[in-house]
Image (cartoon, helix red, strand yellow):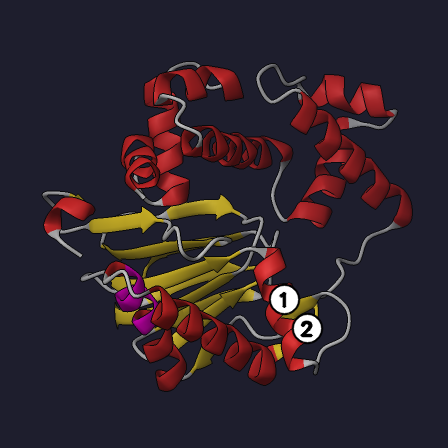
Amino acid sequence: MGKGDRNDRTDGEWARHWQYPELPGLDLLRAHYVRHTFPRHAHDGYVIAAVTGGIEEVGLPGGTERAGPGSVVLINPEVAHTARAGVPEGWAYATLYPARDLVAEVAAEIATLRGTPGFDTPMTMDAEGARLVTEVHRAAEQGNALAADSLLRTVVARMLRRHGGPLPRRAGRGAGRDTAERARALLEDRLAEPPSLEQLAAELGTSPFALLRAFRDRYGMPPHTWLTDARVRRARLLLETGTPPAEAATAVGFTDQPHLNRHFTRIVGVPPGAYRRERATG
């Protein structure tokens, strides 16, 4: 990876978030963060991250994990989490973001899991697994499609064999869970012009506090935090099709491009312009 291929900053932080055309269904991120903190957010697909330096603190529903070199962080789809440096020098890592279909395909091939596959631990010390993750990145950066695809399937299969199980179902009180899911659907339809919490609760026939509690229980974050995350996800899709950042900002409901830049960079780890350029050049 050359210096021109990544988003460098004067404070020593750098990141590259990209896709390798020969590996559909996969996003890659390699970075060194010092002061950057990821706010609470979730992913549509899975996270397999190998820490290569420093310490990453990952805030998960079950508590905080401190991941150092040789460890692999495993996060299932739609699990709300945060991330920040656990030591002054920050942390470096190589991350794979495989889509659900890709993980399901590998799970079907190894034929040891039933139901929707998931990981049953958020972190494991696995130096060989971490090495394999970094080798996927290296092969992709070198344009070696055969090696990259082989290594990707090897590391996904390794994690599923060692730490796989049925994707956990979120527990929830029947009425509260239904209310939260209906609220999410309404917010998804109105990203650009969302209702207030009071308006949303009234439309769903509940109270603002009850809705807030139900939404937190179901999605691990309050509606306004989820809304920002959802807007960034939608903006990513638009940027991937070549939409300029300013247009994407307006389309998803941010007041202007700087507003998009701030939230996008915090959640994705790179600015929207850099994200779009990587996908334009493939």
In the picture shown, does residue 124 fall above or below 203? below
Mark 2 is surrounded, within 10 Å at the Cα level, by few (under 14), some (14 to 19) or many (20 or more) other residues, namely: some
Does the CB distance between marks 2 and 1 fall below 8 Å?
Answer: yes
Question: Where the N terminus falls, by quadrant?
Answer: bottom left
Front residue (pair 191, 24): 24
In the picture shown, does residue 54 fall above or below 252? below
From the top left corner, tell me how far across and down residue 83 is, in percent. Answer: 40, 55
Residue where numbered disc 1 is placed: 105
From the top left corner, tell me how far across and down residue 235 is, in percent. Answer: 47, 29
Taking the image as shown, residue 194 lies to the left or right of residue 130, namely right
Residue 263 falls within the magenta-colored stretch: no
Give the residue at the far front of this rendering. 146
From the top left corner, tell me how far across and down residue 246 is, in percent. Answer: 36, 17
Front residue (pair 60, 128): 128
Disc 2 to disc 1, how far (Cα)?
Answer: 5 Å
Q: Main secondary structure of the magenta part?
A: helix
Q: Secondary structure at mark 1?
A: helix
Taking the image as shown, residue 148 lies to the left or right of residue 155, namely left
For image coordinates 59% across by 83% down, the residue present is 161
Taking the image as shown, residue 278 lies to the left or right of residue 42, namely left
Residue where numbered disc 2 is placed: 108
Mark 1 is surrounded, within 10 Å at the Cα level, by few (under 14), some (14 to 19) or many (20 or more) other residues, namely: few
In the picture shown, does residue 72 fall above or below 221? below
Which residue range is magenta in the image? 135-140
Q: Quadrant of residue 106?
A: bottom right
